[in-house]
Image (spheres, helix red, strand yellow):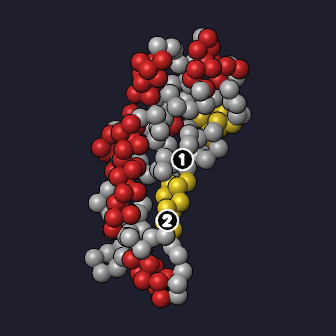
Amino acid sequence: LAWYRSDQVESAPAVTADFDPLGYLLESAKKRRIQVHAWVNVFSLARNKDARILKVLGEGALTRDNFGRLVSDYGADGFLAVPANGTKEPFKLDTPALWLDPGIPEARSFQLGVIQELLERYPALAGVQLDFVRYPYGLPARPLSSLGLGIDFGYAEAAVAAFEKETLKKAPRANHDLADAPAWDR
């Protein structure tokens, strides 16, 4: 949620026609000669299933793990629930959330539009802090896909298709067929 008036993303409930929290903060900070930097969670949507970007790009904008499971399949606790018996697999997200896939150009463009909007509407900002400019980490960690262990993310269909088209190599899915894993890691 945006704590400012935005056309790009949903504004927090505190943002009203009469009150712009970021605008107020910038005015107050200027009087005290304090610099303000905007903080943007770039690819993490927290648990916001109603995020505008998901309405625009659909569930395909979310990242998938190397087994092809959507990040939304992981529970609120970060564990991947196995529907058959309710037990947990030994895989967990480091930061449970809905994560956009940075490998999808439309997801990157959308986020750049958010940052551009901030900078154009609030020229008094001293800077923008970008957080969650990454894929989620799978636990246990998978340092290199060529090891064939654990989970990692970045396997949205559009991201895999772009990799395979660009490199003419295969993405190392499900810890199998790891011949092209070094290219994927690069």
What percent of the width, then of the height, locates residue 39?
A: 51, 62
Q: Nearer the viewer, residue 42 or 72?
A: 42
Quarter of image, res 114: bottom left
Q: Nearer the viewer, mark 2 or mark 1?
A: 2
Image-based side of 161 in relation to 32, left or right: left
Q: Nearer the viewer, residue 28 or 177?
A: 28
Judged from the image, the secondary structure of the residue bearing numbered disc 2 is: strand
Q: Quadrant of the N terminus?
A: bottom left
What percent of the width, then of the height, locates residue 141?
A: 70, 34
What percent of the width, then of the height, locates residue 46?
A: 50, 52
Quarter of image, res 24: bottom left
Q: Quadrant of the C terminus?
A: top right
Q: Is residue 76 above or below residue 155?
A: below
Mark closest to the chain's N terminus, 2 or 1? 2
Residue at the spot 39% in from the left edge and 77% down from the top edge: 23
- Disc 2 versus disc 1: distance between alpha carbons? 16 Å
Residue on which the image places disc 2: 127
The answer to whether any part of residue 90 appears in the image is no
Quarter of image, res 105: top left
Residue kind at label 2, given as amino acid type: Gly
Residue at the spot 48% in from the left edge and 88% down from the top edge: 31
Residue kind at label 1, given as amino acid type: Val
What percent of the width, then of the height, locates residue 185?
A: 61, 26
Residue on which the image places disc 1: 133
The answer to whether any part of residue 146 appears in the image is yes
